[in-house]
Image: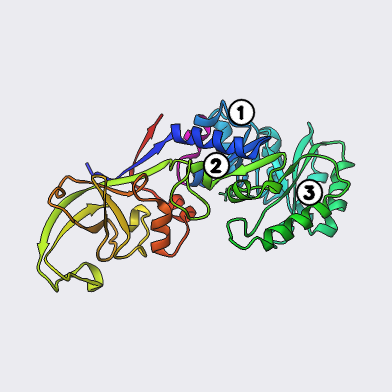
Amino acid sequence: MRPLVCEIRLNYLRENYQILKNIHGNKLLAVVKSNAYGHGAVQCAHALHDIADGFAVAFVDEAIELRENGITKPIVVLEGVFQAAEYEAVERYDLWTAVHQQSQLEELLAYDWQKPVTVWLKMDSGMHRSGFFPHNYAAAYTALKQNLKVAKIVKMTHLACADDADRGMTEMQMEAFDLGCEGLAGEESVANSAAMLDYAETRRDWGRAGLALYGIDPFGKLSGSLKPVMRLSSKVFAERVLQPHEPIGYGASFYTKRSTRVGLVAGGYADGYPRRAGTDTPVALNGVRSRLIGRISMDMLTVELNSSQVGVGTEVELFGDMVNVNEVAHAAGTIPYEILCNIKRAKRVYLR
Ligand SMILES: *Cc1c(COP(=O)(O)O)cnc(C)c1O
């Protein structure tokens, strides 16, 4: 069997949730959109079910999948509905739905609710992706509040630069949010992972933790108390010795400088490992760090066998404990979110 394995350490997921909940205080949503950032939404939601205050997904179908697999805790649909007809599922599956624009608001008010609905009303406090502008927010809030079928309104905004060293943008957004919410009663939700770790003033009634829940530092750092939930590993299944000045792989992008032992590893870009992670991207061979050399192929990649201890059969960690996915993301010119979401085809192993 092909040795590429994607381990999901659900015990780490639980520990991370508790750590983040302690940091944020109040209530914390586990963000499990995009199949829990590639970790498996149903498995992750079940692993957290007894401790999580609720879950968040991007769209209604993601929420339905959780409900149909026995998840009974609150689920927030962060983008709300795309069509008015989806409010039927919001009601049937007892979902909390975001409202971020006027058409969604009007359709929600026009819908014939059989039981009251909970709305997460989104403000655009400066990211300018979605939400009501601060100066229109009170009007949207009031329109919902006056409708008896709206059970509860949670005031929400999203931060564009919470993981940025420059604090200016976040401080501006917080000011805009607080101003736009002035005089409007009810719970609030602001913080994503980076914000809850670094900005005390963003910790309101509900936190929304994604990346950090999966054990990855949103500031690109390598360690901390969070533990990486996903570990992607494989094995060396062939080796060869190349003389100095010999090329390796597609495009002959890498030439050996000296006599080099090269290990061929099962795993490539078709498994979601980023093709742009080139020579020098770290890997760990039986727990000792080494590096990729040459280009990533569709199904295979090549590593430098840097000690006589390693060869065919050696375990190769592509990321997890010895190599942080932040390092791979940095090498590939992307972010850890993208890499985690893309991992596929590898054999999945869920550990408790
Ligand atoms: C994805 C998402 C989050 C989680 O963000 P992380 O940076 O992964 O913690 C929070 N809020 C909203 C609205 C999101 O879309």
Label 2 environment density (alpha carbons within 10 Å; few <14, some 14–19, many ≥20): many
Residue 72 part of the magenta segment: no
Question: Which residue is depicted at the point 48% across and 55% down?
Answer: 220
Q: Give the range drawn in magenta.
A: 38-46
Q: How far apart are marks 1 and 2 (CA)?
A: 14 Å
Whichever of callouts 3 and 1 sits on the residue coming sooner in the sequence is 1
The disc label shown at residue 107, or none: 3
The disc label shown at residue 72, or none: 1
Whichever of callouts 3 and 2 sits on the residue coming sooner in the sequence is 2
Question: Which residue is depicted at the point 49% across and 33% down?
Answer: 15
The residue identified by callout 2 is 32
Mark whose residue sits in front, 3 or 2: 2
Q: Which of 152 and 94 is in front in this view?
A: 152
Instruction: Look at label 1 and name its amino acid.
Output: Thr
* Quarter of the image that includes the C terminus: top left
Label 1 environment density (alpha carbons within 10 Å; few <14, some 14–19, many ≥20): some
Whichever of callouts 1 and 2 sits on the residue coming sooner in the sequence is 2
Instruction: Look at label 3 and name its amino acid.
Output: Glu
- In the depicted structure, whether residue 62 falls above or below residue 132: above
Instruction: Look at label 2 and name its amino acid.
Output: Val
Question: Which residue is depicted at the point 66% across and 55% down?
Answer: 159
Q: Which of 240 and 290 is in front in this view?
A: 290
In the displayed structure image, the side of residue 153 where residue 234 appears, left or right: left
Mark whose residue sits in front, 3 or 1: 1
- In the depicted structure, whether residue 121 falls above or below residue 269: above
State yes or no: Cβ of the residue under disc 1 lies below 8 Å from any atom of ligand 1: no
- Specify how the rendered protein is coloured: rainbow
Residue 45 appears at what percent x and percent y?
Answer: 53, 34
Q: Is mark 1 on a helix, strand or loop?
A: loop
